[in-house]
């Protein structure tokens, strides 16, 4: 621009620093309009410079915005009514009951290979698999659970330590239920409480489970005894 415009506008493009200032404000899309080329070749160069400036600004912003949106989507997603209704444990509930449960659930999305829970860590919540698949690593075997299953219920109720490490096999959408909210839900919905107990009994039939952790026989019996005493009162 200095070479092209220096003779037409020596006061504005007469020096290289003047031309550099024009280039900076043009590339930054904040041109003040007080310095514009007047020659045909200068306007062509200016047009190309403006388009290049737009690309230089828009491209990085688009990349950053896309990466940010993907990260947010990976970590969290919106809990919808349909998503909760597809979980078999909640399928028989009324619409108003599902709406109440939605308020208790927290969403989390994990990528394949991500560890959801680790053996030995304290349990603060249980998980429902809305979509995807997880692998539970026990001491003697590995068990896979898909959409509609849940895990970590007894450890969450008793706040004991996890008996297994759970890893996402592929991208998985989880619904987390806090231990306190789990107790509230089981007290409020006997059908859900019974279903959780039923699944726990089935899992207790396997010998691969450790004596302490998510599914402990005496813990399940204690919960059932407590529920029986409450019912009798």
Image (tube, rainbow, N blue to C red):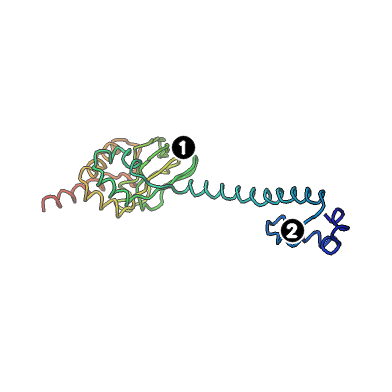
Q: Position of residue 176 (x, y in %)?
A: 37, 48
Residue 148 image point, x, y percent: 34, 37
- From the top left corner, tell me how far across and down residue 6 is, in percent: 87, 58
Residue at (23, 45) in percent of width and height:
193
Q: Secondary structure at mark 2?
A: helix
Decide which of 23, 91 is in the foreground and name it: 23
The disc label shown at residue 24, or none: 2
Is residue 118 something that shows in the picture?
no
Q: Is residue 90 above or below residue 24?
A: above
Given contact means CB atoms under 8 Å apart, are the residues at marks 2 and 1 in contact? no
- Judged left or right of residue 233, residue 32 is right
- Mark earlier in primary sequence (2, 1): 2
Residue 21, horizontal then vertical, whole percent: 77, 61
Q: Nearer the viewer, residue 119 or 98?
A: 98
Which residue is most to the bottom? 11
Q: Which residue is mark 1?
A: 169
Is residue 76 shown above or below 24? above
In the image, taking residue 103 as reference, residue 141 lies left or right, namely right
């Amino acid at each position: 621009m200095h070479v092209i415009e220096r003779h037409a506008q020596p006061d504005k493009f007469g020096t290289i620093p003047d031309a550099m200032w024009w280039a900076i404000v043009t590339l930054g899309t904040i041109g003040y309009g007080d310095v514009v080329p007047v020659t045909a070749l200068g306007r062509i160069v200016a047009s190309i410079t403006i388009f290049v400036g737009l690309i230089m600004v828009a491209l990085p912003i688009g990349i950053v915005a896309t990466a940010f949106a993907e990260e947010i989507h990976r970590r969290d997603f919106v809990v919808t009514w349909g998503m909760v209704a597809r979980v078999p444990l909640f399928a028989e509930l009324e619409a108003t009951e599902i709406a109440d449960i939605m308020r208790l659930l927290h969403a989390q999305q994990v990528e394949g290979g991500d560890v959801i829970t680790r053996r030995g860590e304290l349990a603060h919540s249980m998980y429902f698999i809305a979509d995807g698949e997880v692998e539970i690593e026990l001491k003697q075997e590995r068990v896979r659970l898909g959409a509609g299953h849940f895990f970590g219920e007894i450890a969450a109720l008793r706040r004991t330590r996890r008996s297994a490490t759970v890893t996402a096999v592929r991208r998985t959408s989880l619904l987390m239920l806090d231990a306190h909210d789990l107790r509230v839900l089981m007290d409020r919905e006997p059908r859900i409480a019974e279903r959780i107990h039923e699944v726990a009994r089935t899992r207790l039939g396997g010998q691969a489970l450790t004596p302490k952790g998510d599914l402990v026989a005496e813990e399940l019996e204690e919960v059932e005894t407590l529920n029986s005493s409450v019912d009798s009162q």
